[in-house]
Image: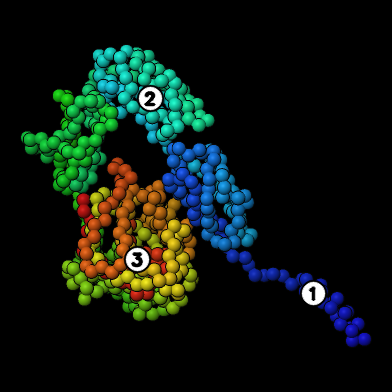
Amino acid sequence: MNRFFLIILTIVSLPVVSCIRNDIPYPEIDAAITSLDADGAKSVSISTDIHEVVLTLEETVDISKVNIRKVSFNDEAVAASDPIVGTKDLSKPLTVTLSAYENERSWAIKAEQPIERYFSLSGQIGGAVIDATNRRVVAQVPSGIDLTGMSVSSIKLGPEGQTTYSPAISSLRNFEDPVELNVSYRDVNEVWTLFVEEVEAAVSISKPDVWTGVAWLRASGIEGRDNGFRIRKAGDSEWNEVGGVSSDGGSFSAAAEGLAPLTEYECVAYSGDETSEIVRFTTEAAVQLPNSGFETFSNAESDKYYSFYDPASPVPVLQTEWWGSGNKGSTTVGSKFAITKPDDTEKVEGKYSLKMESQYVVIKFAAGNIFSGEYGGNVGTAGGKVRMGRPFTLRPRKLTVWLKYKSGKIQQRTLGGYPDDDVVKVGDNDRGIVWVALGTWDCRKYGGTESCPVEVNTTDKSSFFDPAGQDVIAYGRFVTDHDMEWTKVEIPLEYVSTSRRPTHIIVSCAASMLGDYFTGSPDSILWIDDMRLEY
């Protein structure tokens, strides 16, 4: 009887159990690609805002057969609707759907493949105009030259080592009329048209790209002649030769160095005995970063830590925050966990230096740091947000800084993560870093504010700063993995363009280079002092 009762009870209970709902919500994850590696990719740009990956390929790569070696996502739960790794045709966008739990997001993987192209004739003026869209080349020569006896000095209209031409380049002599040229590489066959125009002016100078201490000069003259530039201060009678002229056919360029800030100059280009018109320009100002000796600080934000500005300062630029640190996040559990502070015992000039001391804060590693920007807040107990960048429109050549470093060993509890291309392990030396970047970051794209446009969320690797990003104009860094006494370090800035003007500057220093990954040593300390921009 008891056995029968138990069977009845079990049967009755089954519907009740089956009606229990699973009310535990799935995590809200916006599935994203955080990294992608491919053979022949010069750079990879990932935008989480528009859910797009753009590969810039070497010109010799077959865009229809791109080998994607590796892809990473922002969460282990993310899966792709189709395999991403493998050989892919990227002559058109590859679309995949990423899913995580119940969330889906469509992503596009695209490729661009810029091809370097050039063309020049003997006696050509300046550089040829290459119109890749319409497959046209326009070259200019001096008026009166014999167009039936020309010779091609250089040509490249397709990928290096893969391009053939018909008719043969050596047979091209007569350019009285446009010349059609068949250009072939891989499975591509194109017909280009070559035009030669006669012009009266033998030499012309372009508008210079003018910075604070240098002007970048460009001009067009006749190939084979003595081509160059002369410069002088406005009002002077004597011209000075500009050195370091580089020539490419009839185009030539140079950097006029050692110029004074906010000074008017005159410049001419010459080709043989002929000169261009005079161009006039005024150099830009030389401005230093606010509080770059870190002599000003206060408890304006909290009595738990120092902020590197002072509302009571008589100097207006020192009354508001320009430098931010992780102090606001690390001191939520106590003032003893302040990671960035002034130090009057170690210094090069003034009364103080800045001391950045990495620490293990209860359950997380925190790197001592300072950066141009502001702390954006904690992300629960998992990490934090920082907003980087301050308005800045000048173009310095380098950043100099005095620094001292004590490198600790990475411990098991302070080994959080690391980039795919920078593997570290327990026992490795920690690394200190100072880096600087200039760019045109838009806060609507990078998640920050007008004054601090680039937001980095340490729980989201896709938000980490990319030195090769499309909005970066200049970048430079210094990294050390060993103890250093006070040393003056020079960090040259490498520019991708002399004409683009930045809107913001980012300067970032950390006692632990991989602090964003919660990796480093609690024994690492970085001191900096007397930071300067050189123009």
What residue would you read off at disc 3? 431
Depth check, front residue: 519 or 269: 519
Q: Position of residue 43 (x, y in %)?
A: 43, 47
Mark 3 in CB contact with mark 1 (< 8 angstroms): no
x 89%, y 84%: residue: 3
Tell me which numbered mark, 3 or 1, is placed earlier along the sequence: 1
x 23%, y 69%: residue: 485
Q: Residues within 10 Å of mark 1 (few under 14, many from 20)?
A: few
x 46%, y 58%: residue: 420
Q: With respect to residue 446, does 325 lie above or below?
A: below
- In which image quadrant can residue 247 be found? top left
Q: Give the amino acid type for the residue marked by disc 1 in the picture.
A: Val
The N terminus is located in which quarter? bottom right
Q: Is residue 106 left or right of residue 512?
A: right
Q: Is residue 107 in view from this perspective? A: yes
Tell me which numbered mark, 2 or 3, is placed earlier along the sequence: 2
Distance (Cα) linking label 2 and label 3: 51 Å
Tell me which numbered mark, 1 or 2, is placed earlier along the sequence: 1
Q: Which mark is residue 16?
A: 1
Depth check, front residue: 273 or 323: 273
- In which image quadrant can residue 411 be found? bottom left
Circle 2 sits in a helix, a strand or a loop, which is it?
A: strand
Q: Residues within 10 Å of mark 2 (few under 14, many from 20)?
A: many
Q: Position of residue 467 (x, y in %)?
A: 38, 53
Q: With respect to residue 220, does 491 lie above or below?
A: below
Circle 3 sits in a helix, a strand or a loop, which is it?
A: loop
Circle 1 sits in a helix, a strand or a loop, which is it?
A: helix
Q: Is residue 246 left or right of residue 35?
A: left
Q: Give the amino acid type for the residue marked by disc 3 in the picture.
A: Arg
Distance (Cα) linking label 1 and label 2: 80 Å
What residue would you read off at disc 2? 137
